[in-house]
Image: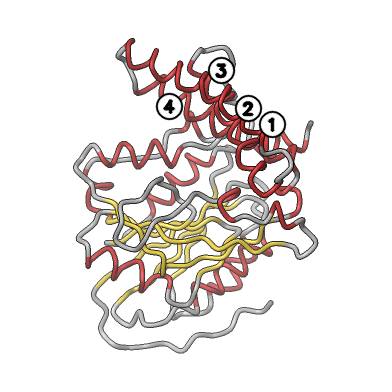
Amino acid sequence: MKPQRTEINHNPKENICSVCIATFKRPALLNELIQSLFEQKNIEDIILEIIVVDNDAEKSAKEIVERFSDISSVKISYYTQPIQNISLTRNMALDKSTGKYIAILDDDETADPYWIRNLIETLEKFNADAVFGYVVPIFDPEIAQWKRHRELYFLPVGKTGDRPLFHYTTNCLIKADKVKKFNLRFDPKFGLTGGEDSVFFDSLSQYEATYVVCREAISYEVVPRYRTDLKFLCKRYFQKGNNEGRIINDSVHNKFTKVQKTIKSFLGIGYYSLLSLILLPNRNKWIFSFTKLFYFYGQFLAISQLKSFIDKTEYDSYNKS
């Protein structure tokens, strides 16, 4: 798809919004994402800058970014970070950002035309430090209905203005002041496994940061068929639980609290094992209990320091199995 030239608006602009994109070998999807950012509406008071950091040593995203560079209505910059680590890649994007606001999207998403406007308005309305949007999955029509549940692939989201149940970088906006002031960065220890976003926002919350939800700030993400494979889902939930267990080990230093969390994860294994058996005839409900079983199994192994996956991405572990 050839980029469409966006009409330049010469009204004075007051605020810069830096959209940070970490990308790895997804040039076609990246093209669609950038195009959706060039088509943002109702942002006459915003200077939009797009920062693309390529984690591919072969620079597969460079040509795509260059195609957009001649369109002067939006500033777009390209950088490379060849060490395969999403945290290091995100950190470079933070370092290159100049905005009052820092927005983050994944390279396999596209943004609704009012995505930025809705994020900023919600952030300012609730005087928050970060706001989390709503990701809408796009499924292949041939995928079985019992696998086509949004919350299997994306974290649940409350109502606009609510405190978020979870913190994620798939669709969010952050005020840059505290990030810059305290030099907050994504932890490279989680750069190959995931979980770096939870650690980042947990660190930011230590500085009295406030978070809210904006359901109107919508992004779209195509869920490829391999991500709906049951084996992949189980590995993904195991990895998520394992990441959470590693975070607990790093952040919880009280022995009694750690024992409590160990027992809770062990009981979770038992509870969801039993529930999976009970719900087996109803696949729509069974799939949630079955994946939760793997989540608590991974968490228990990490907290108990029996097994931690720290050197593989979910995609690597799936494709090599």
The residue under label 4 is 247
Give the structural element (helix, strand or loop) at label 1: helix
The residue under label 2 is 274
Frontmost residue, 291 versus 240: 291
Where residue 90 appears, x then y in whole percent?
46, 46
Report the amino acid beneath label 1. Answer: Leu
Which residue is depicted at the point 51% across and 29% down? 243
The image quadrant where one finds the C terminus is top right
The residue under label 1 is 277
Above or below, 226 relative to 234: below
Report the amino acid beneath label 4. Answer: Ile
Q: Gap in Å between the C-alphas at discs 2 and 1?
A: 5 Å
Circles 2 and 1: CB atoms closer than 8 Å: yes
Q: Is residue 25 left or right of residue 22?
A: right
The image quadrant where one finds the N terminus is bottom right
Report the amino acid beneath label 3. Answer: Leu
Which residue is depicted at the point 47% across and 29% down? 244
For marks 1 and 4 on the same chain, the one whose residue lies earlier in the sequence? 4
